[in-house]
Amino acid sequence: MHSCRDYTGLEEFRVLRDEFRARQIPCLEHYPAIELLTEGARVTGAVLWNLETGDYKIVRAKAIIIATGGYGRLHIRGFPTTNHYGATFDGVVLAYRAGAKLRDIDAVQYHPTGAAYPIQIVGYLLTEKLRGSGAQPVNADGEAFVYPLEPRDVEAASIIRECYVRNKGIITPTGLRGVWLDTPLIEIKNGKGYIEKAFPGMIRMYKRYDIDIRKDPVLVFPTLHYQNGGIETDSDGRTNVEGLWVAGEVSGGVHGKNRLMGNSTLDCLVFGRKAGMSTADYVKSQKGERKIALDHLKHYVQKLQQAGVKETRRAPIILPDYRGKAALARMIDVF
Ligand SMILES: Cc1cc2nc3c(=O)[nH]c(=O)nc-3n(C[C@H](O)[C@H](O)[C@H](O)COP(=O)(O)OP(=O)(O)OC[C@H]3O[C@@H](n4cnc5c(N)ncnc54)[C@H](O)[C@@H]3O)c2cc1C
C-alpha cells in the first residue's frame, strides 16, 4: 500500500490534475453523462448535461470507458457514507440501459469506523490505520468487545451488533448510536507526538468541533464505503456491450463480494491501464462514421412496461438531494 500521511486521495487527485494540465488533455467539467448513445448493439457516444446552464451536449465516440465510481450516496438501508457527492451509481445505470451485464450488486462494503458524532461529520471515514496503530473499539461499559484488526465485514458487524443487538452502544446527542474508538491508546503504544505526525487530517477534522483525539476517544459507527460489485468485465475492463469499457469502483468482479482494505487504488491503476490500452487498440481498428441514437432506451422502457415496472425515480441521480424531511429522518437513526 502507498500513502501520503492521511491525505492520500488529495495527493492522488493533485497528480492526476497536473497530468491533465501538463499534457493538455481535453476535459469537460460540470458536464455529467446522463445517457449513452448507440447504433444497434454498440455504443457510439453519450449525452452530457451542463450542471450550471442545463444545456445538453452530444459527444460522439468510437469507444467509451465508464469510470464513475461507487454508490455510497444511495444511502442503502439509511446508512451514512464516506463517499463524495458524485457517488450515485450513474455509470451502472447508463451501462445497464445499454445492455451491460452486472454482477455482485448486492455486495455493499461498510467501513467499520465512520464518525458517529458530531452531526456535521457523520459517516466520514476514520482510517483503519488508527486501529492499526493501537486505537481500540470500546462499548458503553468500557469493554473491548472486538479485536481491532478484524477484516472490515467482521469489525463492522461486531459494532452494529454491539449497538443494536446487545444494546451496549452509546446514544449520541443527535440520537445516533455508536461505540467509542479509544484513540488516546495510540500514543500510549507509540509515544507522544505520534498522532499529530501520522494523522494530521484526523486531528484537523475533529479540532473544528473542539475534540482532541489525542486526549479523548471518539464515537464511531459503520458507514457505507465501497461498491464491491458493478458492471461485469473481462480482464481488460471490456463489457459485453461493443465499444464499452469500464474501470475503477464502477466495475464488478475484481474483488468478488468482499474487498479487502487498501487495494482499490491498485485495482483502479492496474485495470484502468489495461482498459485504456485495450480501448486504444479497438479505436485504431475502427473506421468510418457512426450513427447516434437512443434505440436502446426505447427498448429498455418497453421492457419495463412489459414487466409492469412503474418508473418513479430519476436515474441517473447525478447529485443527491439532501433537502427536506426525508433527509433529516435519514440522519436520526439507521434502523
Ligand atoms: C474516504 C475514502 C478513503 C479511501 N481510502 C482508500 C485507501 O486508502 N486505499 C484504497 O485503495 N482505496 C481507498 N478508498 C477507495 C478508493 O478511493 C475508491 O474506490 C477509488 O477512488 C474509486 O476511484 P474511481 O476512479 O473508480 O471513482 P471516483 O474516484 O469516485 O471517481 C468517479 C468520478 O466520476 C464522476 N461521475 C459520477 N457520475 C458521473 C456522470 N454521470 N458523468 C460524469 N462523471 C461522473 C464523479 O463525480 C467522480 O469525479 C477510499 C475511499 C474513500 C471514500
Image: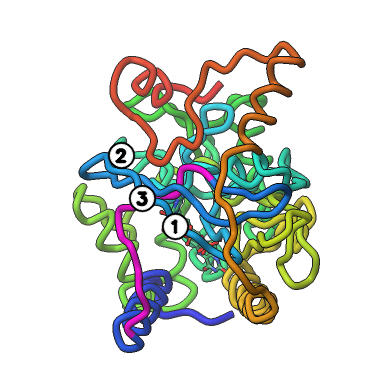
Q: CB under 8 Å between callouts 1 and 3?
A: yes
Residue found at x 79% / y 71%: 235
Crowding near the residue tagged with mark 1, few <14, some 14–19, many ≥20 C-alpha atoms within 10 Å: some
**Alpha carbon of mark 2 to alpha carbon of mark 3: how far?**
41 Å
Residue found at x 57% / y 64%: 289
User: Of marks 2 and 3, which one's residue comes earlier in the chain?
Assistant: 3
Q: Position of residue 272 (x, y in %)?
A: 61, 73
Q: Is 12 left or right of 158, judged from the image as shown? A: left
Residue found at x 73% / y 59%: 242
Front one among 96 and 169:
96
In the rendered structure, find residue 57 and report the number of the disc placed on it.
3
Amino acid, disc 3 = Lys
Mark 2 or 3, closer to the camera: 3
Magenta run includes residue 84? no
**Alpha carbon of mark 1 to alpha carbon of mark 2: how far?**
43 Å
In this figure, which residue is indicated by the disc labeled 1?
59
Furthest-front residue in view?
288
Q: Position of residue 334 (x, y in %)?
A: 51, 25
Residue found at x 73% / y 65%: 238
Q: Is 159 left or right of 209, judged from the image as shown? A: right
Q: Is 252 left or right of 79, judged from the image as shown? A: right
In this figure, which residue is indicated by the disc labeled 2?
118
